[in-house]
Image (cartoon, rainbow, N blue to C red):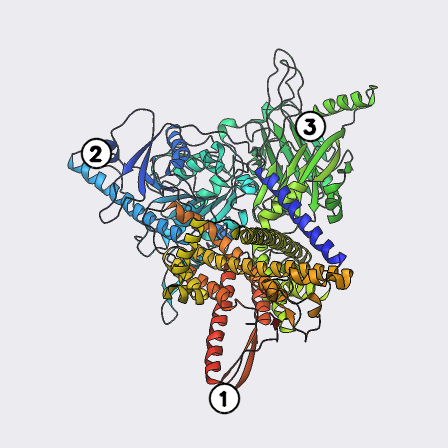
Amino acid sequence: MEGFKAKFRVVALVALVIWIGLAALYDLLRPVSNGCIMTYMYPTYIPISASEGVSSAKYGLYLYHEGWRKIDFKEHIKKLSGVPVLFIPGNGGSYKQVRSLAAESDRAYQGGPLERTFYQEASLTPEEGGADFDSFGFQLPNQYTSKLDWFAVDLEGEHSAMDGGILEEHTEYVVNAIHRILDQYKESYDVRAKEGAATSGNLPKSVILVGHSMGGFVARAAIIHPRLRKAAVATVLTLSSPHQSPPVALQPSLGHYFAHVNQQWRKGYEIQTSHTGHHASDPILSHVVVVSVSGGYNDYQVRTKLESLDGIVPPTNGFMISSTAMKNVWLSMEHQAILWCNQLVVQVSHTILSLIDSRTGQPFPDTQKRLTIFTRMLRSGIPQSFNWMMQSHLASQEPKHVLVKDVKDAAGSLVHASTACPRNVYWGDDGFEKDIYIQTTTVTVLAMDGRRRWLDIQKLGSNGKSHFIFVTNLAPCSGVRLHLWPEKGLSTSSLPLSSRVLEVTSKMVPIPSGPAPTQIEPGSQTEQPPPSAVFRLGPEDMHGFRFLTISVAPRPTVSGRPPPAASMAVGQFFNPEEGKIELPPLLMLQSIYSQKQDMLVKEDHPLVLNLSFTISLGLLPATLSLETAGCGIKNSGLPDEAGDVENSRLCKLRCFPPVALVWDETSGLHIFPNMYSKKIVVDSSPALWTSTRGSDKTTVLLLVDPHCSYKTSIAVSATAAAGRFLLLYGPQIIGFSIAVILFALMRQARAWDLDLPMPPMVTAVETNLRMPLPFFLLAIVPILVSLFLSFLMSQPFPPFASFIIVSVICYLFANGSVIILVLVSQLVFYVAAILHIFIKTRWEVWEGKVNFAFVRWFINLSSSFFSLKVVRVLQGNPSLVTVLAAIILVFLVHPALGLFVLLFSHSLCCHSMLCCFLTASFRSHARRKELFDYKNKGNDGSRQFTSKSDGRSNQRLPLEENSSNSPNSSKSFGDTQLEIFHHRHGLLILHLVAALMFVPSLAACLQRMGMGQSFPWFLDTALCTGVILHGICLTKPEYNCFLFSFPSIRSTEVRLDFIYLVAGYYSFLCGLALVPDRVFYIMATIGIISFALRIVHRRNIEKGEVYMVSRKHSHRH
């Protein structure tokens, strides 16, 4: 590597990679506050005996019991009569992780359903079959009729995320566990019937599966297993489970198993047709409902995009929801915290209990009913799309007056109608003290004053302000009610039936609120409480109505004083086009290294501020701060600092805390309450090959008090951005790293073919980064190829600019990572070679002076051993020994061990070549020094020079001047050895990365030693065999290109540099597709091609037809 620019590029790139890595490591290892409440329990785990013919020595099945009292296991199992739920732990998980879910399910069953509220409930979208399912008469029960029996499989804490074979074994056992659970209920029923005990209820026909992490994927894999009984599983709930691909897609068999399972699921939802094309039967999996719960941006192990069910499960049979958008949860949590976070565990427990039909005591068989229950219990009434705030979601609903009543279901259980407020909280017209007529577009409620406020829609909703937004902390029905009136009247009964008033109170949707402000003393004024609900009407919703009324419930005074300001409500007619603030990319990038970017929002602003971040907050998390600058209060006269503090305190008494609503295409809705200063992060996946347009942007809606002015500042954290970068694009960087190495090998092979000095790996990598041609061909062309493939496959194009920029950054990061790996390994080789030469030189000196009898005896013994015929044959064929040892380990033990043997062979060769080069260099340097001294001393020093030359002088190498830089000149022996070192060093780096990709699988298999280890997957062994052949067949740089011919076919030349180029492009595309495990296919292909060409070459040599094409790279000894 020559030239200042080349060295500067390498140093700058290495420094950048090290800084990003350290910053990301700091951010990812920093503790995260999730706001979860701990769940407590009194667990007891009851072992379930295995079925006949199923070995239980390795795995186990347990039944959970909640309670501190000691119980008889056999008697408890005999009384099984609930609904079976099987918990499947994830990677390295324990069956005891079921305790939080099981304990809260037991409490939920005993305590009954959650308290009834009158907020708007989520409903099925038209894509989910909402148009075909009448959910008006379907209500959630107000009591639970059957308890949940929680089972859990003990998978010995094995790391299923690292090895496809382990994953398949877990699937096999889960299938057996499902059958065992259903058989156990039959056995318990028969025992009770035999003893004459009461045997009420139906036997369960299916088991509900709840899987965490990889356990969720195991649950799906078990459903399509050929040995699973028909309809044995109908409901699956996964928690932080990857579905699209493995979290660490490094092992080919693991990626292949994921692809196979997902393909079977896609086929399972296809309509079965006969040979004539007629409808034969419904889809095989039409009865299965799958719901995936994501942990959000705090889950570093499994990203939300991997947890999506898109393209696997149709919307009519399942959906994914983030915990940040889950009703009554609203939190992001770590990968393990999702199992014990009380807010989420309680909601999940009540959801599963709500699936039970009160008539049968078993889950509803109807798919849409189960999907509706999941939707109502988990989703918020706020739609998952940003268009909810900008467009009407009530356009399809015609105004109508619905009577309110409580009804009973077929079993006699009392259920609530959710169309309007119940009569027991109805306020009569006499309850209002005085009607208030609002003349401004903004209406404010500071207390529960028992008044009704009239808003003229035609007057206040003019000038483009056709939307109405309302935020409050008052509960619907009991605290506030909203009506649409076609005309002014005293009561709803005074209007004709065709012009009844429409109550829209139930269209309020809850949002998370922070802690309420504390009251210093009774009756004193407090800070404004945070809003807990939001309500919105569009122009289509208010069409045909003249007035909107906001009725606030009356509240008595306390000790003769006015009611405390613990209640708030603010409404406003607004124009969605107003309040839009677009944050350009330059502003966000500047905030990384400069001070916060401030913007002033003056008073009388829209209640809804629309902040558009042109760079996704999933890539650049931003800390958004809102500082209250004013609220109509005059200067207090205090000094500047004290005056600002006093104004801020007074403004908090008048202005409610801001709320941020963030929509993301991947992870859905995020809500950040009390938005004075918080870091906004969304678990998006921008700038990927599979991303769609608009995914590179993030829209944030701020609900802020229009009476106050705010100073808004934005700061992007560099460490958070680095952490998100590695989390999102880690698989892409791995694929790019393989491509970088292959491009460097291409550069080496090209140099050898052109009879140029073979460049070191660092120089080859740096050369490929040079502008414009090398960088364009190796970095930009593959990106353009991916866009062309998207066009051919009719896939949506990713955001063009962000996709190219981020892909280039990942490519540069991969180059820097490879350079660091090359430099570190090269440093190790040089240190080892220098130590070797030093020890060998000292040994030659000591050998003649000291008599080491034991050492001489050992050398003689080893010489006799190496003189054996078998050993001499093996010494003469080191490649054969390497191939046999490596392939045996690959097929019988683990592929990584075979790759380690290949690495050991590369290392020995590199060490030997480097030792030869350094020895030659040292002797050449000594020779030059002696010659220099000889010339300086003249003829007087001739005798001294001759005396220093001993018998070993014949072994000295030619002087450097004998080696010219001309391509046609002979190279010195040392230079040739150095080039062979560079060649084998490049292969070592490639195969080192391949071996490292198998290390997680090796670690998982080492954990299972002594537990009946099975043979590796054939796919892994076959691909690693191809990689080994690549390393053996191309041990020498002269194996660059071959000429081979077939009958009637002209001789064809195959050059290795072109093969490396195509392989690099393929690896680049694998990185863009986030499937780095598929690079093994191209590496194995290179090995197979090399092996085949070597065989063809040998046969052609034997026939005397063609010879290997190689440059004349001679050297003198």
Please tell me which residue lies in front, 532 or 174. 174
Pair 3/2: label in front: 2
Please tell me which residue lies in front, 783 or 342. 783
Q: Is residue 1114 visible?
A: yes
Q: Is residue 621 visible?
A: no
Residue 1095, horizontal then vertical, whole percent: 46, 75
Residue 866, horizontal then vertical, whole percent: 41, 61
| In this view, 210 is above or below 1071 | above
| In this view, 489 is above or below 922 | above
Residue 293 vs residue 801: left or right?
Answer: left
| In this view, 1061 is above or below 131 | below
Q: Quadrant of the C terminus?
A: bottom right
Q: Answer few, some or many: residues within 10 Å of disc 1's Cα (few below 14, many 20 plus, some between 14 and 19).
A: few
Disc 3 secondary structure class: strand
Label located before the other in sequence (1 or 2): 2
Please tell me which residue lies in front, 773 or 661. 773
Q: Amino acid at mark 3?
A: Ile
> Distance between the Cα atoms at labels 3 and 2?
64 Å
- Name the residue that disc number 1 marks: 1048
Q: Amino acid at mark 1?
A: Ser
- Name the residue that disc number 3 marks: 436
Label located before the other in sequence (1 or 3): 3
Q: Amino acid at mark 2?
A: Ala
